[in-house]
Image (cartoon, rainbow, N blue to C red):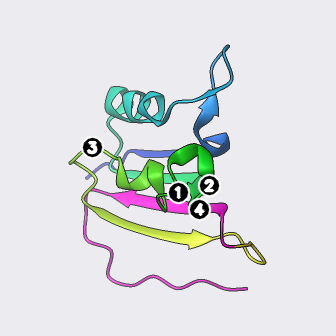
Amino acid sequence: MRLRLLTWNVHKGIGGLDRRYRPERVVSVLEHYAPDLVLLQEVDDGARRSGVTARSTSSGAPSPWQHRCFSQRPGARRRSYGNAVLSRFPIAAAATST
């Protein structure tokens, strides 16, 4: 079995030439490459630009990645960012270290 892995610093969903917050761009790239496991860095967690909804990029992920976990950046304030893991396969356990 081959496992397709994608890791990406999404810079809080802000990117492109226009530097606008567009999480749908992230989703589009994920759909294009169709990895089995996705490791995302700098995923928004409750920032005003994302509508103050936690983990906007990971929770907006398309259905193939039903299994998800999120870890807020160590020492982060209430509205910040962190890392997300999206998987086609069940995640048996998740732990964070500070």
Question: Toward which corner of the image does residue 86 lie, by quadrant?
Answer: bottom left
Q: Residue at x 27, y 43 (%)?
A: 62
Marks 3 and 2 in Cβ contact (< 8 Å): no
Label 3 and label 2: CA atoms lie apart by 21 Å
Which SS class for mark 1?
loop
Of the two numbered discs 2 and 4 in the rendering, the one whose residue sits closer to the viewer: 2
Bin the neighbour count of mark 3 within 10 Å (Cα to Cα): few under 14, some 14-19, many 20 and up. some
Q: Position of residue 1 (x, y in %)?
A: 25, 53
Q: State how many labels appear.
A: 4
Spatial distance from mark 2 to mark 4, Cα to Cα? 14 Å
- Residue marked by disc 2: 47
User: What residue type is disc 2 on?
Assistant: Ala
Which of label 3 and label 1 is nearer to you? 1
Going by the numbered disc 4, the residue's amino acid type is: Asn
Q: Are marks 1 and 2 in contact (CB under 8 Å)?
A: yes
Residues tagged 3 and 4 counted as in contact (Cβ below 8 A): no
Report, in whole angstroms, how far the alpha carbon at label 3 lies from the one at label 4: 17 Å
Compare marks 3 and 4 and give the one earlier in the sequence: 3
Q: Quadrant of the C terminus?
A: bottom right
